[in-house]
Amino acid sequence: MAKPNYSYEKRQREIAKKKKKDEKQAKKLAERDASRDNDNAQPSTDGNG
């Protein structure tokens, strides 16, 4: 029977963890940018139009 390669398994878990963290950070940045764009995109109506 072959010996398990624990180093490989650990590396794969680390890669998956990093990928998930990067995706979460990218999603967070995208949501923040979208909310900031929405705030800037809506013109203020003060009745002088």
Image: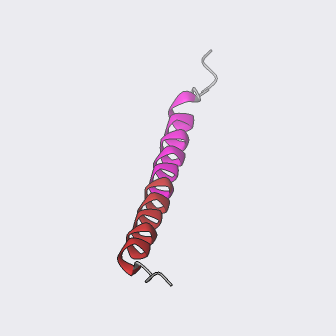
Horizontal and vertical percent for residue 31? 54, 47
Residue 41: name its quadrant.
top right
Q: Which is nearer the eye, 3 or 48?
A: 3
- Was residue 2 drawn as part of the magenta stretch in this picture? no
Q: Nearer the viewer, residue 29 or 18?
A: 18
Question: Left of 28 or right of it: where is 18?
Answer: left
In magenta stretch: residue 32: yes
Vertical relation: 17 (above or below) 19: below
Return the x and y of residue 30 as percentages of the image width and height: 50, 44
Give the image location of residue 21, x and y in percent.
Answer: 45, 62
47 sits to left or right of 25: right
Residue name at image x 40 percent, y 76 percent: 10
Residue depicted at x 40% and y 69%: 14
| Figure check: 19 above or below 14 | above
Count how many numbered circles sit on residues in the image: 0
Coloring applied to the structure: secondary structure
Q: Is residue 48 placed above or below 17 in the rendered structure?
A: above
Up/down of 39 relative to 1, above or below: above
Main secondary structure type of the part rendered in magenta: helix
Residue in the image at 52% along x and 50% along y:
27
Determine which quarter of the picture holds residue 49.
top right
- Closer to us: 18 or 40: 18
User: Which residue is the extreme one toward the front?
Assistant: 1
Q: Farthest residue to the top: give it.
A: 49
Nearer to us in this view, 39 or 24: 24
- What are the residue bounds of the magenta stretch? 24-41
Indicate the position of residue 42 as horizontal and vertical percent values.
59, 29
Q: Residue at x 47, y 64 (%)?
A: 16
